[in-house]
Amino acid sequence: MTAHVPLSILDLVPVSEGSGVRETLEASFEAVRLADAAGYRRYWFAEHHNSPTFASSATSLLIEHALSLTSTIRVGSGGVMLPNHAPLTVAEQFGTLVQLHGDRVDLGLGRAPGTDPMTARLLRRGASDAQSFADQIYEMQSWFASGDSPRGVSSIVAAGTEVPIWVLGSTTNGASIAGQLGLPFSVASHFAPDELYQALSVYRSSFTTGSPTARLERPQAMVGVSVLVADTDAEAELQYSTHVQMSIGNATGDRRPLQPPRAELPHDGGWRAAQGMLACRAVGSPATVRTRLEELVASTEADELVVVTYAHDPQVRLRSLQLLAELWK
């Protein structure tokens, strides 16, 4: 049997049709408590803006509350889109989280806007090129270490917190950045699987311990996968139709809150696009999902899996996460 690598959870705080934001947040925090009790490695929140589907805009606030509800699980960002923020602000926020809650905080960083161009301008988005990204990570690491950056700016709340930084990406470009920086890499194959294997190959071949940003002795790769576990394959596929509908909406520009499950979906262009986006998936009964995840770990040599689960009914999602934890033990 393939070794069962650690499992983590990525949460975009999805809003179901008919639910409000407060109910949505409560459902995510219920999932956080379950994940902590069930033995998941990490619980990450992703940054998104101007979307009717996701309520994960104030990432650091979600992380702080999740830390206050848990005792062992690592909590972090998957990720903060760094060009949307002043790096010093991010360093001080995450340093403060460690000061309040101890060494359970991860900082996953991406370069994508996580939104549309107009909203990105309102966020005062800055440079997103690879060199600017690398320079900002180096400076942030200085704040997390001594508290003093190369430019002589200090942060007493970040000093000594040593917050681990992950690089997020879905392409060979992001993988190359992570490898050259000598940092762990999380590949967003749960919604962009086309370059999964190429990205992992580039990450591992470009990995260096000689960079001033390097914090690892060997590559560490996390692979994203969309998962829904139910008692039977048929029930899981039905519930997963909510995720398929969301992906169709993303492909066609018809974004809306999570829709109820549908037994039949039109097999049009949007559906075909969604199938491509969701190629990295494990949906079915516990036995089916276990086999699929073992195959994925074997083919990617992943060090960790991070799962994304969407369901119109939050209880279906909780049930899936509980079944997943049990089947993976």
Image (cartoon, grey):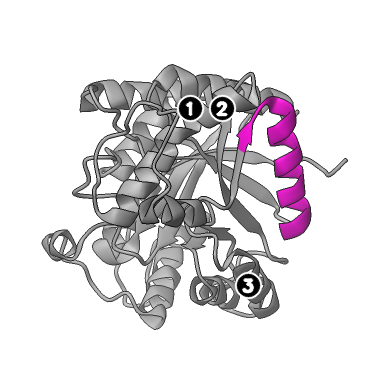
Stretch in magenta: 283-300
Q: Residue at x 40, y 82 (%)?
A: 131
Alpha-carbon span between mark 1 and mark 2: 5 Å
- When the figure is inspected, residue 114 is found, relative to residue 58, above or below; the finding is below
Alpha-carbon span between mark 2 and mark 3: 30 Å
- The one of 26 and 190 positioned closer to us in this rendering: 190
Type of amino acid under label 1: Gln
| Disc 2 to disc 3: CB gap under 8 Å | no
Mark 3 packing: few (<14 Cα in 10 Å), some, or many (20+)?
A: few
Q: Which residue is mark 1?
A: 239
Q: Which residue is mark 3?
A: 198
Quadrant for the C terminus, please. Answer: top right
Per the image, label 2 sits on a secondary structure element best described as helix
Say which quarter of the image contains residue 82.
bottom left
Q: Nearer the viewer, mark 2 or mark 3?
A: 2
Find residue 77 and report its horizontal and vertical position in percent.
42, 48
- The one of 226 and 181 positioned closer to us in this rendering: 226
Total tally of numbered discs in the picture: 3
Type of amino acid under label 3: Gln
